[in-house]
Image: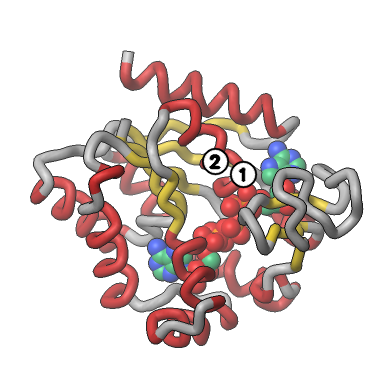
Amino acid sequence: MRTVLVGPPGAGKGTQAAFVAKHFSIPQISTGDIFRANVAEQTKLGLEARKYMDAGDLVPDEVTIAMVRDRLAEDDARDGFLLDGFPRTVQQAEVLDDILSDLHAGLDAVLELSVKEDEVVRRLSGRRTCHGCGRNWHVEFDKPVEQGVCDACGGELFRRDDDAPETVRRRLEVYAEQTAPLVEHYADEGRLHRIEATGAVEDVTRRAIEALESVVD
Ligand code: AP5
């Protein structure tokens, strides 16, 4: 299963990617997570990416594409992967097809998580992320037992810098300008599977898995 998850900021891509990747026993490859790990470690790539992430803009392709190409060449991605957050533009999608063609592989499906804008704003304004394992929580919709502490690993929860209201607004603009055309591109090619991503997290997971299983059957 080689698949891509698309959807606006806060649609639940990271949340669902973890469950879906586990179900299909494939690695979850999140460009946002890779960038954030590099920011935390203050690598050269992280320092470069941070300028764009903090502004809510896309990190330039020359940085992003090389990073994804290297990651997809790793052994654990040979038989499948779930990409979360890449591609985000039509140009990145074309590069992905080239990378996969070099690896003698193809994309099985693109899954779009469909959520209305007012809902994603509510989700992002209450999101808390674990420093330890990266799991996402929500102060209202998905609370840990102890406030500020991850149930899964005991790690401390934090609010992402790019969840500040003005940065969220910019990220939504960037999505409309640069990623919405990508969704149309995949729809025109007949590769897009859209699911409703509101409701309980486990219901969305079930819809996502059913949609992907219908592709591989
Ligand atoms: P990235 O990390 O990919 O951010 P994003 O696409 O904006 O998506 P988010 O991570 O904000 O949201 P999500 O859809 O994963 O939702 P989540 O599951 O957390 O990218 C960050 C930045 O990196 C970009 O802005 C850009 O600068 C850079 N970047 C990354 N990829 C790039 C690329 N390819 N090219 C260039 N630059 C790139 O859920 C959100 C909240 O909702 C959580 O609190 C969660 O608990 C809650 N929630 C989830 N599901 C539900 C539900 N069903 N009901 C209620 N609440 C829910």
Residue 15 coordinates in the image, percent (x, y): 61, 44
Seen from the viewer's position, the closer of residues 144 and 86 is: 144
Whether residue 118 is visible here, answered yes or no, is no
Residue 120 coordinates in the image, percent (x, y): 70, 53
Q: In the image, what residue occupies the spot 77% across and 62% down?
A: 156
- In the picture, the disc for residue 153 is none
Q: On the picture, is 80 further left or further right than 47?
A: left
Residue 9 coordinates in the image, percent (x, y): 59, 58
Q: In the image, what residue occupies the spot 45% across and 73% down?
A: 58
- In the picture, the disc for residue 15 is 1
Q: Is mark 1 within 8 Å of ligand 1?
A: yes
Categorize mark 2 by other alpha carbons within 10 Å: few (<14), some (14-19), many (20+): some
Instruction: Classify mark 2: helix, strand or loop.
Output: helix
Q: Is residue 84 above or below residue 53?
A: above
Q: Quadrant of ligand 1?
A: bottom right
The Cα atoms of the two marked residues, 2 and 1, are separated by 6 Å
Which amino acid lies under the numbered mark 1 shown in the image of this protein?
Answer: Thr
Q: On the picture, is 49 further left or further right than 89?
A: right
Whether residue 28 is visible here, answered yes or no, is yes
Q: Residue furthest right?
A: 146
Categorize mark 1 by other alpha carbons within 10 Å: few (<14), some (14-19), many (20+): some
Q: Quadrant of residue 213?
A: top left
Instruction: Classify mark 1: helix, strand or loop.
Output: helix
Q: Quadrant of the C terminus?
A: top left
Q: In the image, what residue occupies the spot 90% across and 55% down?
A: 147
Circles 2, 1 touching at the beta carbon (< 8 Å): yes
Q: Which residue is mark 2?
A: 18
Q: Quadrant of residue 142?
A: top right
Q: Quadrant of the N terminus?
A: top left
Which amino acid lies under the numbered mark 2 shown in the image of this protein?
Answer: Ala
Residue 87 coordinates in the image, percent (x, y): 36, 56
Seen from the viewer's position, the closer of residues 129 and 206 is: 129
